[in-house]
Amino acid sequence: MTGLRIGVGYDVHAFAPGRRLVLGGVEIPHAQGLAGHSDADVLTHALMDAILGAMRAGDIGQHFPDTDERWRDAHSLDLLSKVGEAMRAGGWALVDADCVLVLEQPKVSAYRDGMREAMAAALGVGPDRVGLKATTTEGLGFTGRGEGAAAHAVVLLERVSP
């Protein structure tokens, strides 16, 4: 048996007026941001859940509950950094992460590398270990109607110490 584990993460947030749009730790100009207790960075949240899942350590709701005022308006990259610390403390290392951002607008291709770099830096790894793609749903569903954004993430962790 190898010391490898796979984790999958998914998150969704609705758009809301009067909020900044933060995706992958990068603020992106847009008329609306995402609603949530923290900065509602749907992409970073999916990545955190994937890592926590691979570690069998629950989910972000357990670690950073929206009932705890400490996490109100928290920067999700700070939370991702805490998840990275827990990952290393638990004897795990990130081998690879692959993420998919799902939204119609705004277009994010110009911010893609910055998002990869920001999330990788929060985890203490090189950006070559964090993949990111963006897609639309061709007008279908809540993301297609522009009501919100979703993100999927998959990670591979390797046990580096007991």
Image: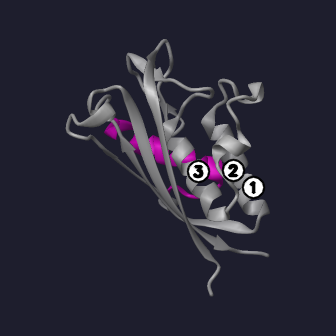
What quarter of the picture does the N terminus occupy?
bottom right
Q: Is residue 20 magenta?
A: no
On the image, the x and y values in percent for residue 90 come to 77, 64
> Observer-nearest residue: 39 or 122?
39
Q: What coloring was used for the rendering?
A: one colour
Of tags 1 and 3, the one toward the viewer is 3
The residue labelled by disc 3 is 49
The residue labelled by disc 2 is 83
Determine the secondary structure under disc 2.
helix
- Residue at point 72%, 46% (across, down): 82
Segment tinted magenta in the rendering: 107-127
Instruction: Give me the disc on residue 86.
Output: 1
Determine the secondary structure under disc 1.
helix
Q: Is the magenta stretch mostly helix, strand or loop?
A: helix
On the image, the x and y values in percent for residue 93 come to 66, 66
Q: Are marks 1 and 2 in contact (CB under 8 Å)?
A: yes
On the image, the x and y values in percent for residue 136 come to 27, 40
